[in-house]
C-alpha cells in the first residue's frame, strides 16, 4: 500500500507500536549519523545523503517504539561499516552501533523460507528477508531502494520511500 | 563532486518541467550514483490523476517513472529514459 495516498499521521499511529524495518542504506545513514553527523558526507556509500537527511530520519523514527532488523541486514551493515570507517574512529563508531542494536529487535527468517521463494533470484536474501519480516510482523518498511519499495507496496506491505521524505522540496 | 544529489534532482525536475510538462506532480523515487557514467541517476515519478469507470466517475492515480542521468560536474541532463519496474 502506498502510504502517500493515505493520511501519514494515521498510518504512523497505527504502525508505531509494531516497529519499523530500515533497509541497509537507511540504517547505515542512521548509525553513522548517531556516531557523527559530519561523517555522513565522508562515506562513499552515503554520498547521496547529508545531515538534513539524518535529521529527517530521526524525526521519522521518533514515531516508532523500536527498529526491527534481520541477520541479513546486520551482516551487510557490519561489512559496510568496516569498509567505510577506519580505526581509530571505527572502535568509537562500533560502540554506538552496538548500543543501537541492543535497542532493536532481530527477526529471524529461516533460510529455507527465503530460498524457497523464487523472488530470491531477483531481490537477493537481504531484501527478501525484509519482505518476509514485514509480512510476518505487519510492520512498516522504510527504504530508499525503488525496486524493493515498489515490490512491497504492490504486495500488501506498508512501505515508505525515504526519497519521498528527503527530496520533497523540488521547486 | 560539484553537483550534489539534491541539486541533481532539482535539475532533473527542471529539465522535465521545461521540456515535457509544466506543473507536473513529481516526486523523487530513486537516487543513485554511477562512477562509470560520472552521473547522478535520478528517477522521478510523474503522477497523474486519471478518470476511470463508467463516464469517468472514478479517479485513480497513474505514475510514470523516468530516469535522468545528470553530469556531476556540470549538472546537465545527459539523457532521459523510461524506468521499468522490477516485477
Image (cartoon, rainbow, N blue to C red):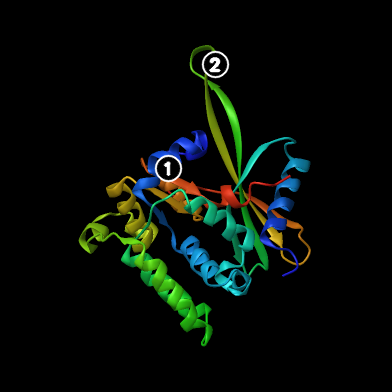
Chain of the residue that carries numbered disc 2 in the rendered image: B
Q: Which residue is mark 1?
A: A153
Q: Determine whether label 1 and label 2 are within 8 Å by CB.
A: no
Side of A56 where A138 appears, left or right: left
Same chain for labels 1 and 2? Say yes or no. Answer: no
Q: Is residue B35 visible?
A: no
Answer above or below: position of A89 versus A135: below
Q: Residues within 10 Å of mark 1 (few under 14, many from 20)?
A: some
Q: Nearer the viewer, residue A59 or B49?
A: A59
Q: Which residue is painted at 51% across and 34% down in the image?
A: A5
Q: Which residue is painted at 53% across and 56% down in the image?
A: A58
Disc marking residue B56: 2
- Where does the C terminus of chain A fall, quadrant-wise? top right
Rendering coords of residue A41 (x, y %): 63, 70
Rendering coords of residue A84 (x, y %): 52, 78
Disc marking residue B7: none
Q: Nearer the viewer, residue A135 or A27?
A: A27
Chain of the residue that carries numbered disc 1 in the rendered image: A
Residue farthest to the top?
A: B55
Rendering coords of residue B81 (x, y %): 63, 50
Q: Quadrant of residue B7?
A: bottom right
- Where does the N terminus of chain A fall, quadrant-wise? top left
Amino acid at each position: 500500500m502506498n502510504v502517500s495516498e493515505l493520511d501519514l499521521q494515521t498510518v504512523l499511529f497505527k504502525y508505531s507500536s509494531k516497529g519499523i524495518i530500515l533497509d541497509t542504506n537507511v540504517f547505515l545513514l542512521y548509525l553513522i549519523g548517531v556516531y557523527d553527523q559530519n561523517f555522513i558526507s565522508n562515506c562513499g556509500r552515503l554520498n547521496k545523503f547529508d545531515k538534513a537527511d539524518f535529521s529527517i530520519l530521526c524525526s521519522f523514527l521518533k514515531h516508532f517504539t523500536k527498529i526491527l532488523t534481520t541477520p541479513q541486514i546486520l551482516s551487510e551493515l557490519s561489512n559496510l561499516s568496516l569498509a567505510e570507517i577506519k580505526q581509530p574512529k571505527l572502535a568509537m563508531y562500533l560502540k554506538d552501533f552496538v548500543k543501537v542494536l541492543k535497542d532493536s529487535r532481530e527477526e529471524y527468517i529461516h533460510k529455507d523460507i527465503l530460498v524457497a521463494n523464487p523472488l530470491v533470484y531477483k531481490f537477493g536474501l537481504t531484501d527478501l528477508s525484509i519482505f518476509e519480516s514485514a509480512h510476518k510482523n505487519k510492520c512498516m518498511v522504510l527504504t530508499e531502494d525503488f525496486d524493493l519499495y515498489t515490490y512491497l507496496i504492490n504486495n500488501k506491505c506498508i512501505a515508505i520511500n525515504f526519497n519521498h521524505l528527503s527530496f520533497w522540496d523540488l521547486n | 563532486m560539484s553537483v550534489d544529489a539534491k541539486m541533481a534532482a532539482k535539475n532533473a525536475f527542471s529539465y522535465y518541467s521545461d521540456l515535457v510538462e509544466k506543473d507536473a506532480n513529481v516526486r523523487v523515487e530513486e537516487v543513485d550514483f554511477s562512477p562509470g557514467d560520472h552521473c547522478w541517476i535520478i528517477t522521478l515519478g510523474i503522477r497523474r490523476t486519471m478518470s476511470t469507470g463508467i463516464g469517468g466517475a472514478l479517479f485513480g492515480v497513474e505514475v510514470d517513472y523516468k530516469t535522468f542521468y545528470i553530469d556531476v560536474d556540470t549538472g546537465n541532463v545527459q539523457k532521459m529514459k523510461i524506468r521499468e519496474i522490477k516485477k
